[in-house]
Image: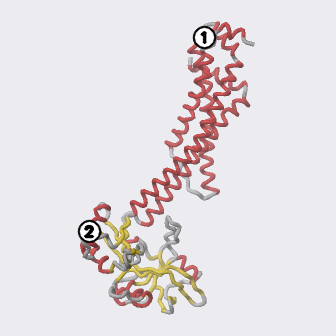
Amino acid sequence: MVLENARSAARALRVNKLRSGLTMLGIVIGVGALITMVAVGAGAEARLAEQIQSLGTNLIVVTAGSKMSQGVRAGQATGVTLTEDDALAMQSEIPAIQAAAATWASTMQVVHGNQNWGTLVSGIMPEWLDVKERSVLEGRPITTDDHRAAAKVVLVGQTAAHHLFGDEDPIGLTIRIRRVPFTVIGVLERKGQSTSGWDQDDNVMIPLSTARQKLFGRVTGKARAIWVITAKVREGEDMVEAEAQIRGLLRQRHHLLPEQDDDFTLRNPDEVQEKYREASQIMTYLLAAVASVSLLVGGIGIMNIMLVSVTERTREIGLRMAVGARSRDILTQFLVEALTLSLIGGAIGIALGVGGSHAITYFAEWQTLIAVDTIAVAFFFAAAVGVLSGLYPARRAARLDPIEALRHE
């Protein structure tokens, strides 16, 4: 019986090919748009996860606190509340911390010959490369001996190296920062952009001690003051617990009373990642909801055409009932027709959506991710739309009075 109804539905659809094609168009567009939109959203989420992963998901960033003046707090990192010794204490006294590196950075003009470039100059501890999981592409890294001797050596990021040296090999060449000469000892591997769009290769690195003595100067009363400490948590350790231990250690070292606020700020990239992930998921859901409207419109189109079909075929329905067809048979016939329209449209829409996703990746160079479950859900919704859209016309056809149907002109 089902096979017979399917054949009957196929014959009815072939009679009005143009009308059937236009009826399926809404489902085709809806399914195709749904798959494409979800693929774009999933690709953006995956790209974002890669960028956050490149920043390090096991890092805790500690920034200096705010400066207080006449009861007014100036904001984060306006007061010198951290020292290099805080970083060393975190590394030695907290087992969960694999390494901690203090940094002090400022944007400055860097000069080589007749070339100059404004870039971020960072004074770093030797542990910085391990903490940030950066490696040296050419040359050597900054060592503990460089830090102790306040050596005038520098690592350059690839963007800064391109603007200062062009195609010339920078190893062994000299650059000047505030008229202080530095020898290039290495070029950092490429890192790419951060999630905020900052070019992580547009920088130069010098020993922290050199930065303090030669460029930035000493802070009154705090010879080893720094602005930022980045701590790398050992694999498998709990980030929340590590953060609590860092807070406890720093409060103890800074002699803060229980009622006093922290004079530093802790940032856990896991929290940032979760917020970005939630925002990305919301955007994906929004895109899917917009695309689903096309499916709804397609379903309304199927319902309208099926109602027209019932009206046109009223006499045929009367004849079928007169020769023994039951209301259930008429109901099934029209439901199968609606379902067939939806399934064919859904199949075409899936092909269109997959092709559109690949086209976006190729032409727009935008990462897309097509999940099998997305295709399955889109196909299921197409079938559901067909059944629900055809239900009312099918019931209307099944409830026709055979005698009245035979009299219909």
Residue 7, x across and y down, in percent: 63, 21
The C terminus appears in which quarter of the rendering? top right
Q: Amino acid at mark 2?
A: Glu
Q: State how many labels appear.
A: 2
Q: Residue at x 63, y 35 (%)?
A: 298
The N terminus appears in which quarter of the rendering? top right
Rendered position, 101 above or below 360? below
Q: Is residue 113 visible to us here?
A: yes
User: Which image quadrant for residue 149?
Assistant: bottom left
User: Which image quadrant for residue 385?
Assistant: top right
Secondary structure state at the residue bearing disc 1: loop
Q: Is residue 204 visible to us here?
A: no
Residue 396, x across and y down, in percent: 61, 18
> Camera-side residue: 20 or 259?
259
Q: Residue at x 40, y 71 (%)?
A: 132
Name which of mark 1 and mark 2 comes first in the sequence. Answer: 2
Per the model, the C-alpha gap separating discs 1 and 2 is 85 Å
Reading the image, the residue beneath label 2 is 259
Reading the image, the residue beneath label 1 is 325
